[in-house]
C-alpha cells in the first residue's frame, strides 16, 4: 500500500508545482483539470501522511516496549501502540476506498427520483421520510437541493418526488442509494399495531451533458 501511496505523493507534488506555473495558469482548461486532480490527490496525500505517521508510531512504541528500561515510558508506549493499532485498520479501509479509480461521472450533479412502491399510504409516507433524509444529508454536505416535481400522498409523504442536487462529487456519493428501499414498522395509519412492510424506489441519474 505504501508503494502506491508514494506514487500518489509524487504526482501530488508534481501537480502542486504545475498549478503555480504561469503557462499553466494561462491555459484555463488545463488549469481547471489540474486543480481538480490536485484536490482529489490532496485528500489522499493527507491520508498517506497519517498512515506513515501511524506506522512510525507503531515502530517507535515497539522499540520502547522491547527496551523496557523505563516503566513510565513503556506504559505510554503501550497506550500509543493500542491507539495506533485501533486506528490503522480503519485508515487502511479509507485509503483502499480512495484508491478505487473514480468514474468520470462521479463529480456530476444529479437528479433523484423517490417513488413509493408497495404498501399503500405507508409507502408514500416512507418515500417522504427518504426524501427528508436525503435533503438533510445533502444540507450537511453543503449541497443544494431543489424540488423539480412532486405528487403528494393522500396521508402524507409522496407518491413521487423528483429533486435536483448540485454540489461537489454528488453522483459519486449518491449513486449507491439507487435501488429498492424497504422498511418494516407499524404505520401511522395502522390502528391495531400490526407491522407492515413498505417499499420505495430510488433512482439517481447524473446530469446530462449539454
Image (cartoon, rainbow, N blue to C red):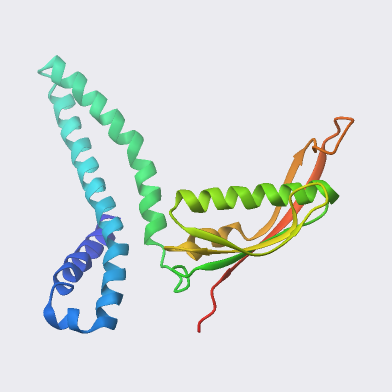
Can residue 119 be seen? no
Residue at the right extreme of this rendering: 192
Residue closer to the observer: 124 or 181: 124
Residue closer to the observer: 79 or 179: 179
Residue at 60%, 57% in the rendered image: 177
Q: Position of residue 187 (x, y in %)?
A: 80, 38
Q: Left or right of 146: which side holds 105?
A: left
To which quarter of the image does residue 194 belong? Answer: top right
Q: Position of residue 49 (x, y in %)?
A: 22, 50
193, above or below 152, in the image = above
| On-image quarter of the N terminus | bottom left
207, above or below 82, in the image = below
Can residue 55 be seen? yes
Residue at the top extreme of this rendering: 71
Residue at 12%, 76% in the rendered image: 21
Residue at the left extreme of this rendering: 69
164, above or below 81, in the image = below
Residue at 20%, 19% in the rendered image: 75
Q: Position of residue 143 (x, y in %)?
A: 46, 58
To which quarter of the image does residue 206 belong? Answer: bottom right
| Number of callouts | 0
Q: Left or right of 177: which side holds 182?
A: right
Q: Left or right of 75: which side holds 118?
A: right
Residue closer to the observer: 46 or 109: 109
Residue closer to the observer: 103 or 65: 103
Residue at 83%, 40% in the rendered image: 196
Q: Left or right of 129: which side holds 11?
A: left
Q: Position of residue 203 (x, y in %)?
A: 65, 64
Amino acid at each position: 500500500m505504501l508503494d502506491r501511496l508514494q506514487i500518489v505523493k509524487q504526482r501530488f507534488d508534481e501537480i502542486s508545482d504545475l498549478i503555480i506555473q504561469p503557462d499553466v495558469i494561462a491555459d484555463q482548461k488545463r488549469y481547471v483539470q489540474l486543480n481538480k486532480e490536485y484536490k482529489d490527490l490532496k485528500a489522499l496525500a493527507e491520508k498517506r501522511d497519517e498512515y506513515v505517521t501511524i506506522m512510525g508510531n507503531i515502530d517507535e512504541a515497539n522499540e520502547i516496549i522491547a527496551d523496557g528500561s523505563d516503566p513510565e515510558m513503556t506504559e505510554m508506549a503501550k497506550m500509543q501502540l493500542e491507539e495506533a493499532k485501533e486506528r490503522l485498520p480503519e485508515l487502511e479501509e479509507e485509503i483502499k476506498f480512495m484508491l478505487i479509480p473514480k468514474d468520470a461521472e462521479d463529480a456530476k450533479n444529479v437528479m433523484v427520483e423517490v417513488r413509493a412502491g408497495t404498501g399503500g399510504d405507508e409507502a408514500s409516507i416512507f418515500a417522504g421520510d427518504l426524501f427528508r433524509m436525503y435533503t438533510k444529508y445533502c444540507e450537511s454536505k453543503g449541497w443544494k437541493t431543489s424540488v423539480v416535481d412532486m405528487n403528494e400522498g393522500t396521508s402524507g409523504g409522496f407518491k413521487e418526488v423528483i429533486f435536483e442536487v448540485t454540489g461537489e462529487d454528488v453522483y459519486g456519493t449518491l449513486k449507491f442509494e439507487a435501488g429498492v428501499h424497504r422498511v418494516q414498522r407499524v404505520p401511522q395509519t395502522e390502528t391495531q399495531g400490526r407491522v407492515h412492510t413498505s417499499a420505495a424506489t430510488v433512482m439517481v441519474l447524473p446530469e446530462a451533458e449539454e
